[in-house]
Image (tube, coloured by chain):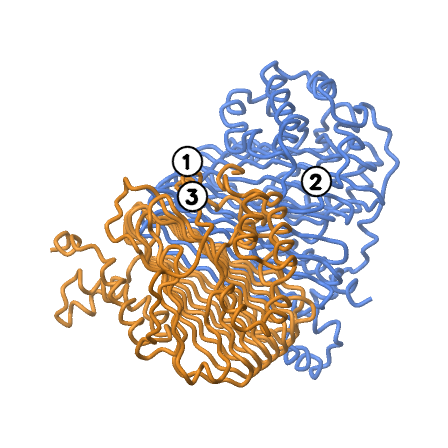
Amino acid sequence: MADALKLRFADEATVNRIADLHEEPDWMRADRHAALKLFNELPLEANPLFTLYVDLRQAKLDTIEPYLETGDAPEVSNVVPEGATALIEIADDRVVARALSPDAGRAGVVVDTLTHGLAEHPQLAQSVRAMIEGGASLPDDDKLAQAARALAPMGVLVHVPRGVVLDDPIVVRWGAGTPGRGLISRTLVDIGENAQVKVLEEQVATEAHATADDGQSLWWGTSEVRLGQGANLSFGAQQDFGPNTLAFVNRHATLGRDAHLRWALASVGAAIHKSRIDNRLVGRGSSVSQVEIGFGDGRQLFDLTSYTRHIGEDTTGDLLSKGVFLDRARGYFKGMITIERSAKGTDSFLGEFAMLLTKAARSVTIPSLEIDQPDVRRASHSSSVGPIDESEIFYLMSRGIPRELARKFIVLGFLEPVVARIPLEQARERLRRLLDAKWPSTSGEVAA
Amino acid sequence: MTLNQRQMVDNDRSRFDFKDEIVYLTQTKRGLTRETVEEISAIKEEPDWMLQFRLRAYEHFLKRPMPMWTDGLDRIDFDKIMYYRKPSEREEKSWEDVPDQIKATFERLGIPEAERKFLAGVGAQYDSEVVYHSVKEELSKIGVVFMGTDQALKEYPDIFKKYFATVVPPEDNKFSALNSAVWSGGSFVYVPKGVEVPLPLQAYFRINGENTGQFERTLIVVDEGAKVHYIEGCTAPIYATDSLHVAVVEVIALANSNVRYTTIQNWSNDVYNLVTKRAHAYENSRVEWIDANTGSRKTVKYPSIYLRGRGASADIISVAVAGKGQHQDTGAKAIHLAPDTKSRIVSKSVSKDGGRATYRGQLKVAPGATGVVASVRCDALMLDDESRSDTYPYIDIQEDDTTMTHEATVGKISQDQIFYLMSRGLTENEAQNLVVQGFLEVFTKELPMEYAIEFNRLVKLEMEGALG
C-alpha cells in the first residue's frame, strides 16, 4: 500500500520551487512544508475501518509529471457565460478565462487564481491566511489532502463578502487530460455572513482523442469551503474526465451558525475517481444536504468517502449517495457520521444506494455511525443494493415502452434527484446528456 | 412479563460473584511458549497430528499482528495468562462422582435443577476441562454424540479429524490461532442423518481462577436432514485483574439440516472475550445464531454464516448491553457463496453509564451467488450521554441480481413511553427496565422459557446498576 501513492515530486526541493515561482509569503511556504511532512507520515488510508477498501492499483502516478509553473494563457477570455455570475477556467496549467459580472465586481466578489486574486486584492490576505493556515481547511489525517496542501502550484479563490446575494452561479471549470501530466490545485470558497451563492465546478477532458495507450493524466484538487453565520451555498460539480484521467478530490466545509450547504456532485468520467468530503457542522442550527452520484462502466472505480461531523447543537445532515455500475465498474461508498457529545438535537441521515447492471460490477457500501450524544432528533442510515425492479419495467412496458428503454428510464430516474440539484440549467442538461451517453448503445439489441 | 414472572426474577447479583478455593491437580506455568503448547498436548495424550496442528497455530499466533480495527486489545498481557489447568483427574460420568466443592458451585448456578427439569444433556466446563457430563439415554439411543471435545478426539477420531478446523482454520485471525494452539474443553456434537434432537443441548461454561485463560473449542456437526438446538450460557466470578476467554466455535450444517445456536454471554467485567464463531451452511440448510452479550470488559465476536450450498438460509440475532467500563464490539457476518441463499441479520444494542456498544458486520455476495436476498437491521439505544454507540456495516455486493436492504437507527428511550408507564404506577426504574426489555424482545422471544427469565433478570440487574 505504501507504494500506491508514490510521488517522485513529493520532496522539499519541489515545495521550495513552487513557493519561489509564486513568490509566496513565508507562512505559506512553512505551511507547505508542514503538509509535506504529514503527507510523508500518513498511510494511504488512515482510518482502519476503510483500509481494505482502497485500491489505487490502476493508478500509475510515477509516470506523471506535475505542472509546477502555472499562469495565464496568451489570451484570457473575459466573457461571462449566459446565466452565470462569473467564470474562471483553467485548461491544464493555464488560465484561459477569467470573467466577472460588473454587479458582482462592485459587490466585492472575487473569482480568480489565488496568486492573481491576492495581488489585486491584498486586503484579503489576512482572511485567506486565517482560513487555511495550519491546514485548518483540510483533514489532517488525509494523505491526499496533505499532498494538495504541500504541492499545489495553482489556487482558485472564490470570495463573497457578507450579505451579497447572487442569483446566478459562479462557474469554476477545469480541463485535464494531457497524457503524462497532472495539475494539483486548491480551491478556496469563502462565503461571508448571510451571503447566498451558487458555485458550479466542471471538470472536463481537454484531450478529446486520448486512448488507453496514451498514458494517464491527473487532476488533483480541493474545495475548501468556509460559510459564515447565516451563509447559504449551493455547490454543484460534474466530473467528466476522459478514461485515462485520475481524479483525486477533497472537499472540506466548515459551517457557521445557521449556515446551509448543499452539495450536488456527479461523477461520470475518469479511470479512478477518489473523493473525500468532510462536513463540519460547527455552528448551531447549521445544515448540510449532500447528494452524490457515480455512473461507471468499463473498469472505472468510484471511491467516494464522506465524513460528517455534528459538533454544534441542532445541526442537520442529510446525505445521499447513489451509484450505477456497468461492466466491471466498482463503487466504494464509505460514509461516517459522527455525533459529538456537544451536538444535542442532531438530525442525521445517511443513505447509500447502488444499482448493479452487469454481473461483474461491484458495490461496497459502508454507512457508519459513531454517536456520543443520544439526544438526537434522528440518527440513522440506510442502504440498499438491487437490480432494476421488474415490476417497474413491467409497468413501463405496459405503457408501450420497449424493455431496454424502460430500464434506461428507471436508471436515469434513480439518478435524477442529483441532477435536479445542479445549480445551472445548461449544466443540468449537459449532465443528463452525459448520463444518457453512458447507457450502452448495444444493450438495446441484446434485449430485443 | 407477568407479575408471576417478575417475582421469579432474582436481582441478587452476588449470586454470580463467587470464587471457590480449588486445588488444581495439573496446570501449566503462566505465559505462552512452545513448551507450554507441547506440555498441554502431552498432558492430554494427544495424537501427533494434533500436536503438530497446535504448533503450527502457535507459530502463526506469534507472527500475526494484533488487530488494529478495534482498540484496547493491547492491554492483554499474554505472559500473565495461565493457558491450561485441570481441576480433576478424569471426566465424571455421574453427578455423585463430582467433587463436592465443584458441585456446590454448580448448584449455585442452578445446573442440577435445570438438568432435572428440561435438559437433554449437560456439559459443564469448569475451567479448562469438562468435569461433569451426562447424556441422557434417549440421546445415545438415537445416535447423538454430545461430549467434551477432548474426549471426542479420542472416541470419534475419524469424524473429528474430518471436520476439525475446517470452518475456522488457525490462520483465520490472531485469536483463532491462539485458541488452536492451546485449546482445551468445549463441546462436541454430532447429530446423525435425519435425526431431530427433541430438546435443546446445553452447556454451561465457567471461568474460575484469577488470570485463567479459557480456550474452549466447540465443534458441531449436523448431518443431512438433522436438526438440533445448542445452548451455551456463561457466568463468571468477578476478579480485579484481566481474564481472557478465547474460544472457537465451528458449526457444519450439512444439506437440509437445521441448526440453532443460542448464547447468553455474561462474563464478569474483567474478562476479554474474543470469540470466533462460524458456521458453514450447505444446500437448503438453515443456520441460526441467537447471540446475546451482557458481560465482559470487552467482547469481540461476530457470529458468521458462510452460505455454501444453494438455497441455504441464515438468521442472526445479535444483542448487546454495554455498561460501565464495557465495550461490546459485536455483530454478524453473512457470506453468500451460493445461489438462491438468504440471510437476515438483526442487531440490538443498549449502551449506558459510559459503556460502548459497537455493531460491526459484514454482508458479502460473492461472484456466482445469484438470486441472493439479504437484509441487515441495526438498532441502538443509548441511555445517557456518557455512553457511545457505533455502527460499522460492510456491504460488498458482486452479483447484479442481489436484493439487499440495510437500515440502522440510534436513539434514546422515548420519554413518552416512560411517562406513560409511570402513569400506570411503575417507578422510573421499572419503566426504563420494561422499555429496554421490550427493545430486546426480538432476542428474548427466541429463547426457551427458563433462559428468557434469566436473560430478563440479567438486563434488570444491568439496568439497576445504571440507576444506582
Separation of marks 3 and 1 at Cα, in angstroms: 63 Å
| Labels 3, 1: front one | 3
Q: Amino acid at mark 3?
A: Glu
Q: Amino acid at mark 1?
A: Glu
Whether residue B169 appears in this view of the structure is: yes
Mark number displayed over residue B143:
none
Q: Is residue B136 left or right of residue B31?
A: left
Of residue A71 and residue A443, the one placed in the foreground of this image is A71
Mark number displayed over residue B205:
2
Of residue B21 and residue B386, the one placed in the foreground of this image is B386
Q: Which is more N-terminal, label 2 or label 1?
A: 2
Mark number displayed over residue A65:
3
Q: Within 10 Å of the Cα at label 1, are there few (<14), some (14-19), or many (20+) other Cα atoms?
A: many
x and y, in percent, of residue A41 in the image: 62, 43
Separation of marks 3 and 2 at Cα, in angstroms: 63 Å
Circle 2 chain = B
Q: Residue reaching furthest right?
A: B21
Q: Are marks 3 and 1 in contact (CB under 8 Å)?
A: no
Residue drawn at point x = 59 percent, y = 77 percent: A228
Identify the residue position indicated by label 1 in the image: B224
Q: Colour of chain A?
A: orange
The letter of the blue chain is B
x and y, in percent, of residue A27 in the image: 65, 58
- Label 3: state its secondary structure: strand
Residue drawn at point x = 54 percent, y = 68 percent: A118
